[in-house]
Amino acid sequence: MGRAFVYAIVGGGVAAGYAAHEFVKRGVSHGELCIVSEEPVAPYERPALSKGYLLPEAAARLPSFHCCVGANEEKLSPKWYKEHGIELILGTRVKSADVKRKTLLTVTGETISYKFLIVATGARALKLEEFGVNGLDADNLCYLRDLADADRLVDVMKSCTGGNAIVIGGGYIGMECAASLVINKLNVAMVFPEAHCMARLFTPKISSYYEDFYKAKGVKFIKGTMLSSFDFNSDGKVTAVNLRDGNKLPADMVVVGIGIRPNTSLFEGQLTMDKGGIKVNGKMQSSNSSVYAVGDVAAFPVKIFGETRRLEHVDSARKSARHAVAAIMESDKTGEFNYLPFFYSRVFTLSWQFYGENVGDVVHFGDFSGNSFGAYWINKGHLVGSFLEGGTKEQYEAIAQATRLKPAIEESAELERQGLGFALTLSQKFPASQPLDSGGSGLLIEKPVYALHATAGVIMAASIAVFAYWYGRKRRRW
Ligand code: FAD
Ligand code: NAD
């Protein structure tokens, strides 16, 4: 049993949905593209699962959040795929791949052959068993990666109203689920090993703002320790969480968010790996020229950092997928992926965005006792990362553009004084619509491809240098 396609996508999550949309925009013909997905539903916006999906009232449900509504584009319902002649092979895991023969083998025994393959298998949630905690098939222990997990979490949450929920992990899943559990009227305690929440991204000062906000909503923080074991009742349900520090926390339910592993196993030994994912070039092409990788599973060159990175966020899944399709369908016209990393979250009434990378010295700004504040990261004398809570659209665009420009920063005290004003002024002088061929390298233009861009780049570099000089002078005058 077998079918042949020109293009095949393995995995049916965010990246697959955006790739399908791009294929259609670029004129894919009926019958040329298939998507094979283990999940039983058409690609959807995964971020909804820890936010709208968990609301006690008017909760988001499919089909409302199929891709690409998250990017304010059309919603790709199952009917859309049919109308465009895209074969959606759902509820079907690919169990092996042979990149030399250009075939996939599904659990149903079907062989799918392709000319071009896009790997969009995402990642799986790490399980506590992998850290030596056993006996974890309890009904009231939840993870959150896919729709089935989310349905289970909703059921357990509804059965525990007024009870105690323990959240294991202080990262994205932990923070977003803790907020949802509070909104669903559970008593929530978060347990994580670090000294503060969201340690991968937040500074202690930023964390402390969110922790105080959560505490005011009733969330308890138990930091610097990990769970060692669970207590179970005769039904096999978790009744308490035992911590390494000797404390016992009574529990009606447990939510675990302790990180992910990219789903690379189909391609181990066949494709070059890096940073835990499939290594690709600036066209999202792997070590096998017919195979592309996108989203959480792809380790790609992030030009602005001059390094290969694997990102675990929805914006990079969407954009890397679109770029891979462009590279496949219009290889000659498609350059290197030039991506500014962007992460965000929304919990309670809070909302933040982050651009770039959080390395180097930090300059905080704004009102940490109010609703809007932020931080810049300065590395090797340049602004490389920006965070803003409670911003407007214009302000978020400003910090994004300031980060993209990577301006030289001479004096962090003055940057702190100017705060958000620095990004706003810089982005007004150099709006995002101007071509930035340098990949955001600011004062250094790297081998521009087109003469026009080269000229624009040089003008831009010179202007930023003037701005940096003006900025330095301003500092000295004040
Ligand atoms: P996924 O969306 O995970 O899709 C992978 C797909 O591949 C799945 O459907 C899976 O079943 C399928 N698959 C895997 N292996 C196989 C196989 N062998 N055969 C067939 N199918 C297979 N990011 C943000 O920036 N902001 C947010 O607010 C945010 N919220 C999130 C909330 C939750 C609950 C989660 C889990 C993630 C969130 N993220 C967020 C991260 C974001 O959703 C991911 O970065 C994004 O989904 C990655 O897209 P992907 O297509 O690479 O992988
Ligand atoms: P994470 O890496 O953000 O956080 C993991 C947390 O678990 C950390 O606090 C870590 O110290 C803790 N931890 C790790 N091992 C542990 C152990 N053995 N015992 C106890 N604690 C342990 O991962 P996550 O929160 O699980 O998120 C999963 C994925 O989903 C990530 O890729 C994330 O980017 C993505 N996600 C993103 C968003 C967003 O961007 N807004 C929202 C939800 C999920």
Image (spheres, grey):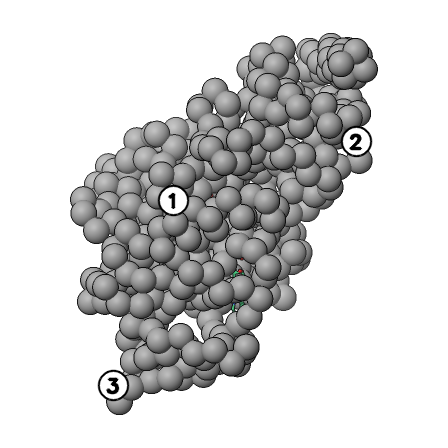
The part of the image, by quadrant, that contains residue 163 is bottom left
Q: Decide if residue 436 is on the left or right side of residue 448.
A: left
Looking at the picture, how far across and down is residue 11, in whole percent?
A: 41, 54
Q: Is residue 401 above or below residue 261?
A: above
Amino acid bearing label 1: Val
Distance from disc 3 to disc 1, alpha carbons, whole Å, reads 34 Å
| Quarter the N terminus occupies | bottom left
Q: Which residue is mark 1?
A: 347
The residue lying at 39 percent from left, 57 percent from top is 219
Q: Disc 1 to disc 2, how far (Cα)?
A: 33 Å
Alpha-carbon span between mark 3 and mark 2: 59 Å
Q: Which mark is residue 286?
A: none
- Image coordinates for residue 94, horizontal then vertical, percent: 41, 63
Residue at 31%, 55% in the rendered image? 182
Packing grade of label 3 (10 A; few <14, some 14-19, many >=20) is few
* Front one among 175 and 466: 175
Name the residue that disc number 3 marks: 235
Residue 277 in the image, given as x and y percentages of width and height? 59, 56
Mark number displayed over residue 381: 2
Secondary structure under badge 2?
loop
Q: Nearer the viewer, residue 383 or 316?
A: 383
Q: Tell me what residue is drawn at x 42 percent, y 33 percent.
A: 22
Q: Residue at x 37, y 78 (%)?
A: 240
The disc, 1 or 2, on the residue closer to the chain's N-terminal end is 1
| Image quarter (top left, top right, bottom left or bottom right) of the C terminus | top right
Left/right of residue 473 with respect to residue 143 in the rendered view: right
444 and 196: which is toward the camera: 196
Label 1 sits on a secondary structure element that is: strand
Whether residue 145 appears in this view of the structure is no
